[in-house]
Structures are given as C-alpha cells and as structure tokens.
Image: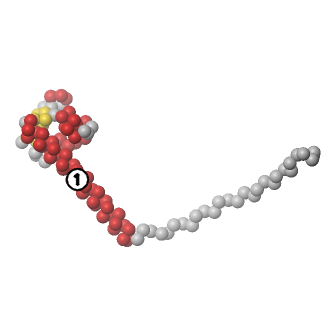
Amino acid sequence: MPASEPLPSEPEPITPPTPAPPSSAQPSPAAVQSARDLLVKANAAKQNRKQKKLEKILGLLNTKGKITNDEVEKLLHVSDATATRYLSALEKEGRIRQVGKTGAGVVYTKV
C-alpha cells in the first residue's frame, strides 16, 4: 500500500438495541380522576355552547317567523350538515316544525 493512502478503518461492532423494560407503571387513581373531571368539564362546556347556538336559532325564528337551513348556516357559521343536525335536534325536542320534505322548499316554523 502506498504511504499516502489512509489505513482502512475497522468496522465498528454492531450492538443490538436493548429493549426498554416493560412499562408496568399505571397512572395513579388521582390522575385518572383528574382526567375524568377534565373530560366531564369539557363535555359540559361543549353542551353549553351547543345550547347557546340552539337558542340563537330560536331567537332568529322568533323575529322572522320561519327559518331555512341556509340561514342557520350563515347565522352560526357552520356547515350544511351541522345546521341540519341543529334543526333536527330542535325538531325532536318539539320546539320547531319542518314544513316541506326536501330541498330549497324546506322551512322551519315555531311550534
């Protein structure tokens, strides 16, 4: 081998990764209860926001006398499907009534 050539390096030995020990640590009962409390509070807040939106729909319905799905979409800045769900929920509660079957002819009136 010429003197100007570097010596070949020896390959480093390959060591397999050591597996992590199985985790037997479970969350404490206090942590589980805290997580449940947060979930309950989050669900309650979500229901409160939904109820406020339903009340907005009823408020508009009181002023106009009838309302369409498109008007609910614009009022609440929600999708067509979400507006339909809100109107269906109010209809199931017996607070509004659907007039018409499908399409642009459908309006909702107060019961």
Residue 74 spot, x, y in % from top left: 22, 35
The residue carrying pointer 1 sits among few (fewer than 14), some (14 to 19) or many (20 or more) residues within 10 Å by Cα, namely few
Q: In which quarter of the image is the C terminus?
A: top left
Relative to 73, say whether 21 is above or below: below
Q: Which residue lies furthest to the right in this view?
A: 2
Q: Mark 1 points at which residue?
A: 47
Q: In the drawing, does residue 61 fall left or right of residue 32?
A: left
In the image, taking residue 17 as reference, residue 84 lies left or right, namely left
Which of the 4 image quarters holds residue 31? bottom left
Residue at the spot x=19%, y=29% of the render? Answer: 103
In this picture, residue 32 sits left or right of residue 13? left
The local secondary structure at tag 1 comes to helix
Residue type at numbered disc 1: Gln
Of all residues shown, which one is farthest toward the front?
4
Residue occupying the point 48% across, 69% down: 25
Q: Can residue 23 be seen in this view?
A: yes
